[in-house]
Amino acid sequence: MQNIVWIVNGILVAGLGIALFRLWCYRKQIRHITDELKKQEGETNCQVTSCWPVGKTEKMIVSMNRVIQQHKEKEIALKRENRIYKESITGISHDIRTPLTSAKGYMQMLLDDAIEEEKKREYIRIVTNRLEDVTGMLSQLFEYARIEAGEMGMEPETFLAGNVFAETISMFYEDFVKIGCEPEVYVSEEPCYIHVDKSAFIRIIENLVKNALVHGKGGYKMSLTREENRMVVCVSNLTESIEQKDMEYIFDRFYTSDQSRSRKTTGLGLSIVKRFAIEMGGEAEASLEEQCFTVKVYIPVSE
């Protein structure tokens, strides 16, 4: 009987020792994890490590590292977006100020009574062009602000997409004549009705064509086709200003591949295209293959 008591006591002592040892391990692991987490408050790429494999703390550490990595990726993306936003606002401010300053200079020259009539007409034309540049940029900024604030007030209606597409493309005829290029335009003969806000759909086409004119170097192709239950607007052109590294950010607000900002663009055109496409229940995608830049917009077809 006494032997049994000793055995039981031995087992209890051993169990207590193991429990105390595991408790010590847990406390040491928690202190270590706490110290590791404090390091994450600064700029570091280090992950939380384990000093002693005990219980399920290893799985907890893996989960912590996953959350920390996701947080860092979001933080990096946010910093990048804020940087681009600040740079873009500075650039757009410069883009607006430059034509206004130029227009002001020509207006002052027009006040000279001695100026010839031919020169006056030339200066008036230049002032008009400068003011149109400013108007276009301000319109895009105002439009994007309304989209962000949810104030666009979409009014869907059913219409034949091909007709609206062709009419909108024809509005840019003079622009293509000026650069000596004739775009290749194709509209599917198969009727394609969509139920969306017509003005927003026209804006999508206008922005795609304007983007092609700004960044294109020929090879302009524009089409409207149907793929099963979706209408597809496709605009492509050869380009020298867009590179593969730009593709990840091509639909981001204020993003422009023209870092010199010599093309008078706000970087909002394609961003507006994608936002409108999503509002219509569709999507937008872009690709670059052998210097041919292509944007496709998909919108559900209305039966």
Image: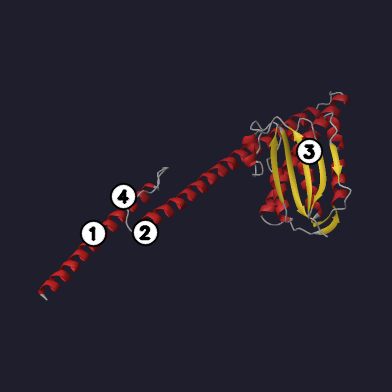
The residue located at (65%, 35%) in the rendering is: 257
- CA separation in Å, label 4 and label 1: 15 Å
Mark 2 touching mark 1, by CB under 8 A? no
Q: Mark 4: which amino acid? A: Cys
Position of 40 with respect to 297 (left or right) is: left
Q: Which structural element holds mark 1?
A: helix
Q: Which residue is mark 4?
A: 51
Crowding at dot 3, Cα within 10 Å, few <14 / some 14-19 / many 20+, comes out as few
The percent position of residue 136, horizontal first and vertical second, equals 75, 41
Give the Cα distance between marks 4 and 3: 66 Å
Q: Which residue type does callout 1 highlight?
A: Phe
Tag 2's secondary structure? loop
* Residue placed under numbered mark 3 in the picture: 132
Residue found 66% across the figure and 44% down from its top: 251
Q: Residues within 10 Å of mark 1 (few under 14, many from 20)?
A: few
Image coordinates of residue 175 in percent, x first then y, are 83, 34
Of the image marks 2 and 1, the number of the one nearer the N terminus? 1
- Asked if the residues shown at circle 4 and circle 3 are in contact, with their CB atoms under 8 angstroms apart, the answer is no
Comparing labels 3 and 1, the label whose residue is closer to the camera: 1
Q: CA distance from mark 2 to mark 4?
A: 13 Å
- Within 10 Å of disc 2 (Cα), the crowding (few <14, some 14-19, many 20+) is few
Q: Secondary structure at mark 4?
A: loop
Q: Which residue was labeled with disc 1? A: 21
Which kind of residue does numbered mark 2 sit on? Lys
Helix, strand or loop at disc 3? helix
- Residue 179, quarter of picture: top right
Q: Which residue is mark 2?
A: 56
Along the line of sight, the residue nearer the viewer: 168 or 111? 168
Pointer 3 or 1: first along the chain: 1
